[in-house]
Each structure stands twice: as C-alpha cells, then as structure tokens.
Image (spheres, rainbow, N blue to C red):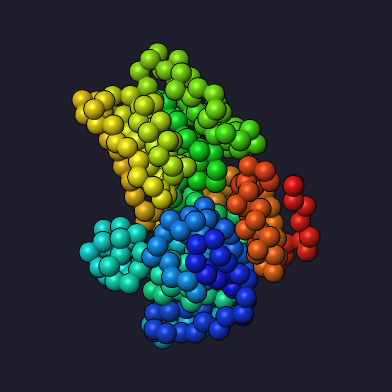
Amino acid sequence: MKALVYHGKGQRSWQDVPDPGIEDPADVVVRVEAVTICGTDLHILKGDVPDVRPGTVLGHEAVGEVVEAGGDVRGVRPGDRVLISCITACGRCRFCRDQRFGQCRGGGGWILGHLIDGTQAEYVRVPHADHSVHLLPDAVSSEDAVLLADIFPTAYEVGVLSGRVRPGDTVVVVGAGPIGLATVATARMYAPRRIVAVDFASSRLDAARAVGADATVGADEDPESLVRDLTEGLGADVVVEAVGVPETFEQCTRMVRPCGHVANVGVHGKPATLHLESLWSQDVTITTGLVDTFSTPLLLDMAASGRLPAAAALVTHRFVPSQMEEAYDVFSRAVDTGALKVVLGAAAHDTVSVPS
C-alpha cells in the first residue's frame, strides 16, 4: 500500500509500505476513505516531537471502512463505516476509567502517527478498537466526520471545557486555524457575551466570523487594546491559545482578567516564559492538556443533527491520496494558500486549484 512516511526532520515521502495486519485480538484494520493533515504533523516535520521515529507513517485523523477485526473486537465488524479517533484507549487503566484517555497507560493515548504507524495511508491498524473507533451515523458525511477525529474534540475539551466558558463571558481565541475555529464554534454552545478571534491572516478572520466570532483583530494590530476596550479594562474571562508559540502564549496571559482562565491548546516546540512576577497575585488559572476524546459521541450526535458547522466552513482544499505531498505543501503554506483544513479522499477531484 501507499503511505506518507516520516524520514526525519523536514523529510517525508508518499511511498510503498507493507500492508498492516491484525497484531492483537483487540485490533481492527481500516481502509481509509478520508484523511486530513494536522498542525501537529507539521510540528513533527519541524522536529518538535522527537518521539516520532524515522520510518513512521504519519497521521491521526481518518474515516474509513473496517476490513478486518480481531477476535476480541465486539463493537464493530468488517463493512462498518467508522471514525478513527486521534486518541487510542485501552479502557482499563486508571486514566481510562476516569475518561482521561489521552493519558492511557495501557498502550493507548496519542499513538497513531506518533508511536505507531498512522492514518495517512491506504490502510491503518487501530489498536483497542472497541474504545478507539466510532460507528458513523449515515447522516454524517466522511468529510464532516474526519473533523471530529481531532480538531473538534480538542477545541471543545482542551479549549472550551478546560477554559470553563460560561454564559456572559468574553472569550478570546488567539489563532484562527482549524483548532481556533472549532473553539469559536463550540464556545458558542455556552452563550458567551462575545467571542474575539485573533490571527494574522484576514482569510482566517473571515472564517472565524463565519463560524460565530463577534469580533476579529489581526495579530499585527493591537488585540490587547481591543480586549481592554471591550471589557472596560478588566480583561477577558477566558483566553484560548491555539497557535503554539511563546509570543502568543505570553500575549494570552496579558489579556486575561484576574480570576480568569488561560486554556493552552497549541502544541509548543519551544519554551514560553511564564511571567509570575505579574501573574502571581492575579489568581489566574492556566490549563494545558492533550485531548481525551470523551466528547466524540456527543459531537457526533450534534453533527448528525446539524448543530456543528459543516466541513464546508473549514475544509478549503480537497485532494486524492496520491496528491499527499501536494496537500502537505498547501497546508504548510497556509498564509499563502489560504488553507484551513485539507481533506484527502478517493471522491476528491483529480485536480485541485491551489493559489500560488
């Protein structure tokens, strides 16, 4: 089969690799029908995630059809259409029993495209299938569903829930990429007073308004002044960091009010300074975390009932699998190409118009 293989910092290729098979009775093998690229994959290619060994197939978000199931699998069977979660869960360890699946100690957690071969391939083996794949309702398209493998659960759990968004809050989302946009969309479920999106790219700010942001500001402008003006100098109740660089994290801590929450969602490859000299007396809560995906069934139900933005609001580019290298190039040059989320699937057009 073909797959996107990581060969070390800055190196990747779409190449032939062995087909996966059942290695444990709890495994399934899935034929991938739709797959996407995550910002975390770009972090891997930059060398920010040293756990990923050269030779690993990347990717942790996909939708497909079960083609083989181990003898212990009870929840799905060959022929079922499933969502592959970005988080694998054994279902038995102390963290899984608390629904902290991202911290699974039984061979799960974030392993696809990280510690084992991932989803950017024609076929993928998924361990602990009964806790790691979800049957898809007929009402949810593959393109919509693939956004629920990672970005919507991450935004909702690590951004909105950890940030404790409440009715009447002022919420600032720094970074209007796919995670930031999903944060805007899911924060609206809690009826905040206003949501402010911050980003360099005007196209991403347009998308933020389309999914529910009440105000937008370019990061090269002065978002801190805007937040002060909107809150009579108090600061935002919740600030979500969805970029993953030191400058934006530090900016978030300057925009939050006393007793407010900073929810860090971005993947950081470099240290950020925590300015305790100004924060120590502010009673600010700062949270970090890896998504647990406990919310995936809820989000699937919401998608099936039309209560989440459709893929059309976030997917900007579509490719066939053989265009994986081109898809990476487009996604990595998002400022130039306007890419938000790219999806690869057999039903995509054979050619894709890509802004230069």
Left or right placement of residue 96 versus residue 332 in this view: left
Q: Is residue 147 above or below residue 20?
A: above
Q: Is residue 185 visible?
A: no
Foreground of the two, 152 or 269: 269
Left or right placement of residue 323 versus residue 96 in this view: right
Q: Is residue 171 visible?
A: yes
User: Residue 356's x, y, as percent?
Assistant: 74, 47
Residue 213 falls in image quadrant: top right
User: Residue 261's x, y, as percent?
Assistant: 32, 33
Foreground of the two, 48 or 37: 48
Q: Is residue 299 above or below residue 277?
A: below
Image mark count: 0
User: Residue 100's x, y, as percent?
Assistant: 30, 57
Query: Residue at 39% of width from left, 54% of height from top?
Result: 291
Query: Residue at 63% of width from left, 42% of height from top?
Result: 335
User: Residue 140's x, y, as percent?
Assistant: 59, 57
Foreground of the two, 213 or 258: 258
* Furthest residue in direction left, as rendered: 281
Q: Is residue 337 above or below residue 206?
A: below
Could you tell me which quadrant the N terminus lies in? bottom right
Query: Residue at 22% of width from left, 64% of height from top?
Result: 94
Query: Residue at 21% of width from left, 25% of height from top?
Result: 281
Foreground of the two, 212 or 13: 13
